[in-house]
Amino acid sequence: MKNNDSALNKNTKDNKPNKAGGMPSVTSTFKQLVQSKRVKSNIKNLLRVNKAGGFDCPGCAWGDSREGMLHFCENGAKAIAWESTEQTVGPAFFKKFSVKKLKKQSDYWLEYQGRITHPMRYSKTSGHYEEISWHDAFQLIADKLNSLTSPNEVEFYTSGRASNEASYLYQLFGRCFGTNNFPDCSNMCHEASGIALSQSVGVGKGTVVLDDFYVADAIFVFGQNPGTNHPRMMNALRKAVKGGCKIVTVNNLREVALEKFASPQSPMELLTSKSVDISHLYLMPKLGGDMAFIRGIAKTIFERYPNSISADFIQTHTQGFEDYAREVKQTPWVNIVEQSGIDQAQIMQAANVFAHSKRVITTWAMGLTQHKHSVATIREISNIHLLTGQLGQAGAGLCPVRGHSNVQGNRTMGINEKPNKGMLDKFSQFFDHAMPQESGHNVFSALKALDNKESKVLIALGGNLAAAAPDTKFTHQAISNAELNVQISTKLNRTHLLVEDDALILPCLGRTEVDEQSAGKQNITVEDTFSMVHASAGNTPPISAMCMSETAIVANIAFSTLGNKPVNWLELASDYDGIRDLIANTIDGFANFNEKLSQPGGFHLANSAAELQWNTANRRANFSNATLPLSLFSDETEALLQEKKVPIFTLQTMRSHDQYNTTIYGMDDRYRGVKGDREVLFMHPKDGKKLGLQDMDSINITSIWEDKQERKLVGFTVHFYDIPRGNVAGYYPELNPLVAFDSVGCESFTPTSKSVPVVIEKATEHAIPVSQK
Ligand SMILES: Nc1nc2c(c(=O)[nH]1)N[C@H]1C(S)=C(S)[C@@H](COP(=O)(O)OP(=O)(O)OC[C@H]3O[C@@H](n4cnc5c(=O)[nH]c(N)nc54)[C@H](O)[C@@H]3O)O[C@H]1N2
Ligand SMILES: Nc1nc2c(c(=O)[nH]1)N[C@H]1C(S)=C(S)[C@@H](COP(=O)(O)OP(=O)(O)OC[C@H]3O[C@@H](n4cnc5c(=O)[nH]c(N)nc54)[C@H](O)[C@@H]3O)O[C@H]1N2
Ligand SMILES: [Mo]
């Protein structure tokens, strides 16, 4: 395997740890708490996170049993400390800094200034944000919305932290206003998973629950870095391994947590050099090579382990088996090996584990979803589960590991530009109000519409669209075009600064804070990656008396725009039980919502596929029979690449250990041995040598796309790393300027952030780490 490569071992930096977790995680947690300057209240916060009566960690969507002592992780602690800080950004701050001045600051600096404390409006005359009353802010939005020629001229963006209550009211308001324009972060995230799973098993969510991890015989982990992004998942993997489960990791990079993990909650592993070996097999495909790899597993099963094929399951539950079987048999091994970048013997080893395990779970995240062929790839995963009947029994099933803590709940609540007809009909009937039927905009079409000025208003319930979306130059211009840019936020970010005309920043409460309304202290609810719905209540006093809850902000915008139609918005915001009653009446699975919430640990939403009920058009689980794609790129781009006389690399853009999406906590990536810099590019040492580069050399990166526009970043630093030849990796959002806007996944429209063709050249000037710039 690649780690035996002597060229690589020589160049691996010595500060890269040989295990993840352990004492450094604990040290880092406490460092974050101290930096937040609210040490005492944040320790209290950590003791209450993900526990019954406490609040849901804003860090990620991984589920928890909610019993026992501690349920936080290092990066969850960072997310909490980052939100619950003493530092504030108020009118005096905005008086000091004009938007023009703020634009010169880094994303890190902007968010680091602290929590936003007052509603602010951009003044074109002064070039500054200036204080505005809540009343005037709501009236301004209402007047603008009511002046639009069509309700489709507004975009309602959502980032996946918003609660069920806030997002339910938000979509209800948007629809009653007349549009299905609900672009959301999911469009850039797990969209392909939702589409693929809906097509294959009839429900766009995972089919397993946390307990399944403890009875699985094998867990295949594709394209995700849980050590950083879902650290609580590491505890589940560790426990599974200790119970004899085999973990097969399929990752483009060598991620240390998936090799060795020391649980910070085990005194032995915390205090000694002990750790648990996580992966039984660690395979490193080329970027986008997973579909070929999975096809190889299927081919091996057909050729060598036909006994593991479940004829019964196929017969009873599925459609399309013959076409799929033919396609697998027709796919030559040479294509499988060439495209996956994994040799046949290793693929067969993985197939051996899959075929000989009674219960298999497959998990995946962004390494699978952000490619052109993501939907086809995820359907290929479903295929092998259908082939072997690995679905709907304890310890077996499909598990897309969601990102934002309530991104799954947002979709359940109706944040969806293509809502299903059943849901729309229910809304129309219950509210006695005709809901719009035509599909609305996703992130891709919303930004296009803002770019060509078809859309005039952008309202965002959280997030940082400017930094999250691809092709920075295009995206920034599109957002700046909005005649009114309304951001409901906790912290200052790039999206607030893209304003040419009129803009509002509306400061909201975070998860950790007490949400007091006229009926008393309020709970909100969220849904985790296992479809568990539970309550969350903050306990820290709000950072400012001027902050409002997201739910109240949405209700006030709705009331100012529509009056008391079709519901009494403000009454709903005074007691969220009323919103939950509406949810109970209009969303499947939520009957008796308020009563069910009192169950410790919340309740599970039924999953039809896990019950072997197929909610597809033909009422069967469907095999797919796609041919392996010839290229990761569009035909036109591929033709351009063929003409180039220089080596082409494929780039993936991912997260460091010190960030939450566009929120940058710091410049280090401890698990990958990077210190003080984010403008880095990981590259195989042999590729580096071929380009005449030394480790830590300064480089320029240019991406290639069929429109032939120049997209170039200069002064990045090369880090030699254990990554397949021909592939390179670096951090989002810094690399977003290289992702061409039109380069999106088939059907999903997700930016292809994990496969960008690039050319790399040595830079003349030496790179300066961001921390010293
Ligand atoms: N601390 C922290 N937690 C987070 C987040 C955060 O930013 N910080 N973000 C949240 C969100 S919104 C999300 S969506 C999740 C994201 O969670 P992840 O999906 O883990 O996020 P990425 O950092 O994008 O990591 C992608 C992983 O896939 C691998 N990979 C990339 N391309 C390929 C490929 O083609 N094939 C294979 N097999 N592997 C590939 C990369 O090497 C990397 O390990 O995390 C959530 N949790
Ligand atoms: N190149 C590349 N691009 C990517 C990705 C990638 O892997 N590579 N990943 C994509 C993925 S998976 C995702 S999910 C998107 C993320 O896209 P977004 O969800 O839009 O971005 P975030 O960085 O999570 O949003 C951060 C902002 O949210 C606000 N915020 C934080 N907490 C709260 C809160 O409680 N309430 C409210 N109202 N606001 C809050 C703060 O102001 C903060 O600045 O990015 C995508 N973009
Ligand atoms: Mo995400």
Image: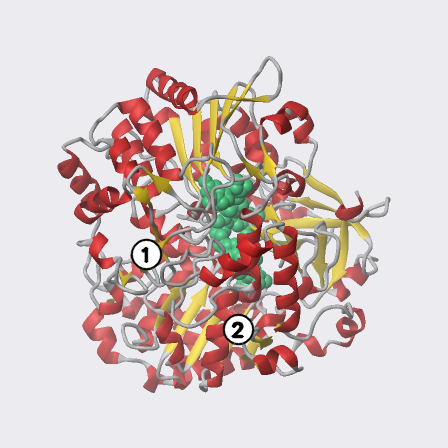
Q: Position of residue 143 (x, y in %)?
A: 37, 17
On residue 440, the disc is none
Marks 1/2 in contact by CB < 8 Å: the verdict is no
Q: Amino acid at mark 1?
A: Gly
Pointer 1 residue Cβ closer than 8 Å to ligand 3: no
Residue 536 to residue 581: above or below: below
Q: Position of residue 462 (x, y in %)?
A: 46, 40
Q: Earlier in the sequence, mark 1 or mark 2?
A: 1
Is 470 positioned to the left or the right of 313 in the image? right
Q: Secondary structure at mark 1?
A: loop
Q: Position of residue 333 (x, y in %)?
A: 50, 74
Q: Residue at x 59, y 51 (%)?
A: 38
Q: Is residue 372 visible?
A: no
Q: Secondary structure at mark 2?
A: strand
Quarter of the image with the N terminus is: bottom right
Viewer-side residue, 326 vs 238: 238
On residue 249, the disc is 2
> For mark 1, what is the residue?
204
Viewer-side residue, 497 vs 320: 497
Give the residue at the far top of this rendering. Answer: 125
Viewer-side residue, 577 vs 330: 577
